[in-house]
Image: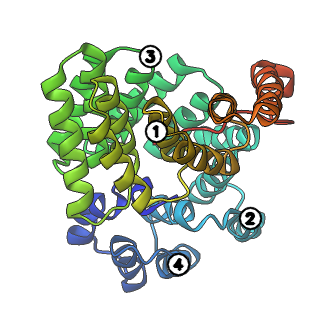
Amino acid sequence: MNRSGIVALALLIAPLLLHTQEPATCKNGLARLQAGAYAAAQDLLWECIESGAGDGNDAFYLAQTYRPLKNYASGLTRVNQMLEKLPDNVDLLYIAAYLHYRRNETKDSMMLTSQAYRLAPKDWRIQQLFALNYISFSMLEAAKLSLQNAIALKPDNAELRYQLSRLYFTQGNYVASIDTSKKALAIFPDYAEVYHNLALCYEGTGNVDLTEKNFEKAIELDRKYNRRDEWPLVDFADYQRMLGHPEESIKLLGKALEINPESSKANYEMGELLSDLHKYDEARKYLEAALKLDPCNAATIYGLAIVTRRLGDVAKSRTYFDQFKEVDRENKDPANSGKTCLAAESVH
């Protein structure tokens, strides 16, 4: 995950750095995190926690360092060793539960989260973890309640309101999502992901002007803070394509691929757009790249079947059509969940 995927974490922790009275190790760890030096931050924050000097904030930010580094296994080894000595330490239970969640081990995460909840029912981090796991189980109403509980416990946290706004968007409740997004911006005005969410909401309501303004604001803030997030560009390109502006869409997708050449979504959208423009040779290149990056995407395989047929490669087209039918069947079969070829998750 790229730097922006931590929901502007470096900027969100700035108030903590100004007011903390913690020991130097803890403060230095937070400072490293704010600077984007995740490995150094992780080492310092572990030292902070292991010394007993840290608090719930330090444990929370330590857990977040694992998202860009993805060294979840080593983190679990370290936290489990500590839990053997301190089995009722809420901070350690939270870290372990979070790492299991990031590894898609939701049952293990929920067990640890429940154990932490019994010890600290008013801990906002635990409520947030419940929500994230509920979302994994598609229990959206339970997730909404947990996020609302977390916000009641931590009303000054913009990330919680952003996550709630995303949940409302997923449910198609654009009015509630817009309202919650604005509350997040009142806490943290430069929250790029919130503007991205607002753009998607206004797109859902049919407000072209506000859709474009919020996409542009999200992209501007990502550029301002040097956050390499291709998603606003990809979604804005898709919107421009829908409005009938293919050249503008190509420019946006080009910028997205400069940021992340391995974005399966950006490659797929570029391939589909070029196919619409009858540029089949170029389209095939991008669709093949998308399929290599995400071999479970049935739409990409179907797109390649169409493009190769247009190019006169009938045998290859038939192969892709057969592959499409098989992958599409597997994707729709709940019995195959976690076992065979399921569509890749799109995480903003």
Three-letter amino acid code of the residue under disc 1: Leu
Q: Residues within 10 Å of mark 1 (few under 14, many from 20)?
A: many
Q: How many marks?
A: 4
Element marked by disc 1? helix
- Real-space Cα separation, disc 1 to disc 2, in angstroms: 41 Å
x and y percent of residue 115 in the render? 67, 42
Q: Residue at x 19, y 41 (%)?
A: 185
* Residue 310 appears in view: yes
What residue sits right under mark 3 in the picture?
171
Mark carried by residue 315: none
- Which numbered disc, 4 or 3, marks the residue that appears first in the sequence? 4
Q: Which residue is mark 4?
A: 39
Marks 2 and 4, the one that precedes in the sequence: 4
Instruction: Give 212 or 320, whichever is nearer the viewer.
Output: 320
Q: Position of residue 164 (x, y in %)?
A: 38, 30
Residue matched to label 1? 274
Q: CA distance from mark 2 to mark 4?
A: 15 Å
The amino acid beneath tag 2 is Ala
Q: Please name which of the two marks, 3 or 1, marks the residue nearer to the observer.
A: 1
Question: Callout 3: 10 Å neighbours few (<14), some, many (20+)?
Answer: few
> Which element is circle 3 on?
loop
Camera-side residue of 66 and 170 = 170
The amino acid pointed to by label 4 is: Ala
| Residue holding disc 2 | 73
Name the quadrant containing residue 24: bottom left
Residue 149 lies left or right of residue 195; in this view the side is right
* Residue 207, position as x, y percentages in the image: 18, 18
